[in-house]
Image (spheres, helix red, strand yellow):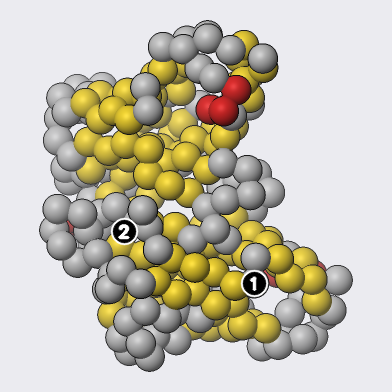
Amino acid sequence: EADIYQTPRYLVIGTGKKITLECSQTMGHDKMYWYQQDPGMELHLIHYSYGVNSTEKGDLSSESTVSRIRTEHFPLTLESARPSHTSQYLCASSPRELADTDTQYFGPGTRLTVL
Amino acid sequence: GDSVTQMEGPVTLSEEAFLTINCTYTATGYPSLFWYVQYPGEGLQLLLKATKADDKGSNKGFEATYRKETTSFHLEKGSVQVSDSAVYFCALSDRAGGFKTIFGAGTRLFVKA
């Protein structure tokens, strides 16, 4: 059973607000990811990290930023939210061990609505 | 680059019907192949995986066989239940791509009682 947590689960905010979506995992995984999931269900990688102090942008351009100061924590921040940021955000992690490094463990997601 | 193509949904079946969701892939290396499932209001979870040609992954009555000759990894279940209603994602991960996961677009399955 994967132990990866996201808070809040649901968030409704006004345009222009700064928000941080939290993601934590207790499995000691080195690699962590953020995906944006559109209403059609397709997943888009927006950020990833292969370890502490390592962050990279994903395939989909995003106005969000991430940080990785601790192994277990990978928060995503939007400095000024807009209605176009309305989406489901999924966090995932995967271990370093070669036998399982290609498997991703997902959190429950944060559904963000920007009015 | 690597890619995954899966059949469009939604797929609607009656309980106890046979399920097939088609998935094909393109990859430069020798990827691992996955099926993930997403139940309503939840994140994705691994359903099954196969790491080399002719491997069969299986879990909860679902099966998929890694077919290198047809570059396919079709998901099957002999008798679906209402509780199988979910979105199913085919995916691949390749060492050549740094183990980044490429997901298909997802197929929504509805099972009617």
Can you give x and y, in whole percent of width and height, for residue B45 in the image?
43, 47
Q: Report if residue B105 is visible in the image.
A: no
For this view, does A30 lie left or right of residue B109?
left
Q: Chain of mark 1?
A: A
Separation (CA) of disc 1 from disc 2: 26 Å
Mark 1 or 2: the one toward you: 1
Local SS, label 1: loop
Q: From this view, report whether residue B59 is shown above or below residue B76.
A: below
Q: Amino acid at mark 2?
A: Lys
Residue A8 is tagged as 1
In the figure, residue B86 lies in which quadrant? top right
In the image, what residue occupies the spot 84% across and 79% down? A14
Query: How many residues crowd around disc 1 within 10 Å: few (fewer than 14), some, or many (20 or more)?
Result: some
In the image, what residue occupies the spot 14% across and 53% down? A99
Q: Report if residue B102 is visible in the image.
A: yes
For this view, does B22 lie left or right of residue A37?
left
In the figure, residue A32 lies in which quadrant? bottom left
In the image, what residue occupies the spot 25% across and 30% down? B57
Residue B50 is tagged as none
Can you give x and y, in whole percent of width and height, for residue A19 in the image?
67, 83
Task: Please give the residue where the numbered disc 2 appears in the rendered image.
Answer: B100
